[in-house]
Image (spheres, helix red, strand yellow):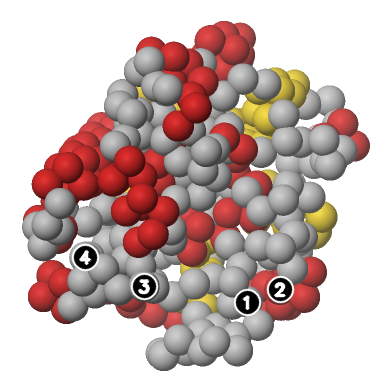
Amino acid sequence: MSKVSSYTSWQPLEEVIVGRAYTPDYFDFIDDAQVRNQLQQILAETNEDLDNLQHTCEVYGAKVLRPNLPDKKSFEQWQLKDNGAPLPPLTPRDWQISLGDKLLRVLKVDELDEICNEYGDAVINPHGENFDSNCIINGASASCIIRVGTDVFFDNSDYLKPEQSRWIQENCLDNRYRFHEAITDGHGDAVFAILKPGVLLSSKWDDQLDLDKDFPGWDVCKIWDSSIWAAMEVGKFKQDNFNGAWYVQGQTPTEEFTRFVDTYLKKWVGFVSDTVFDVNCLVLDEENVIFSAYNKQVFDYCEKHRINPIISELRHSYFWDGGVSCCTQDIRRRGGLESYL
């Protein structure tokens, strides 16, 4: 049985989950050829990019685990019902997190059951075997928790309420830890990311944080311009068709496809104009970090700190509202619990 052990976001990565999208054939039943073709292209390219992300992690020595997909026959019973298509197991970091030697399942996703079952008593699943809608952490997001060794930051927002933070502190952590409030409005891993001790990326949404106080003496690089705007310019995307919620890189979706997404795939998309994907990265170790796109400010900052920035493209992060951090969840990193602040 593999051991859960992850105290930071930057110690050398040894084991990680990489998400998975539905394969294109799951949507063969869609009659409208334009809608079907656009959706299947997104799915095919997403899985291709996730396979490349897996390969990159493996090249740097990490064991990679992948979630299952639901049975296709049972999935087809969905058939465009009003409640919309269920999410694919694409963004494990939103649903669970390794806290030291514990694996907390903030949301129990069935497609991750087989992986999580391998960790036995290390798994904390407050929802029980069957989903409990009254569970205290129902509706929370694991992306709101940032680990810095003995210091753990909780984004107390609509996505991780104070009572949910307290439950996690009391049931998953012990008196070795210090707890901090970090208001990031629900997407902590797209607001600040630690590349290694003393080196921190943040975004324009860090205005409610006091990084100078919490990280004294650290070099903070604040990203103002997300790579989404450069991608839209290269793709010659018509901005008047962009509602800020989702965007398909390299094309302007048809009216039929837009209507389909807004009707049936509302659970899939977020609000990407607010997300700075350049901060949403995966640190392999203190010398190598994976990003989904080139950003000159970020790459210059990495060069300053002798970090090798690796591009593993996620062409449709602007559709899914999920970057490299969201699409991965570290299970084991080499090294133990240390204090950095």
Q: CB of mark 3 within 8 Å of CB of mark 4?
A: no
Question: Residue 182, relative to residue 216: is it above or below?
Answer: below
Identity of the amino acid at label 2? Answer: Gln
Q: Badge 3 is on which residue? A: 82
Sequence-earlier tag: 4 or 2: 4
Sequence-earlier tag: 1 or 2: 1
Q: Badge 2 is on which residue? A: 164
Question: Residue 338, relative to residue 192: is it above or below?
Answer: below
User: How far apart in space, not on screen, are marks 1 and 2 (Cα)?
Assistant: 5 Å
Identity of the amino acid at label 1? Answer: Ile
Q: Secondary structure at mark 2?
A: helix
For label 4, the crowd category at 10 Å Cα-Cα, with few meaning under 14, some 14 to 19 and many 20 or more, is some
Identity of the amino acid at label 3? Answer: Asp
Q: CB of mark 1 within 8 Å of CB of mark 2?
A: yes
Q: CB of mark 4 within 8 Å of CB of mark 1?
A: no
Residue 326 or residue 226, whichever sits in front:
226
Identity of the amino acid at label 4? Answer: Leu
Residue 209: percent from the left, percent from the top?
83, 40
User: How far apart in space, not on screen, are marks 4 and 1 (Cα)?
Assistant: 25 Å
Give the numbered dot on residue 69.
Answer: 4
User: How far apart in space, not on screen, are marks 4 and 2 (Cα)?
Assistant: 29 Å
For label 2, the crowd category at 10 Å Cα-Cα, with few meaning under 14, some 14 to 19 and many 20 or more, is many
Give the numbered dot on residue 137.
Answer: 1
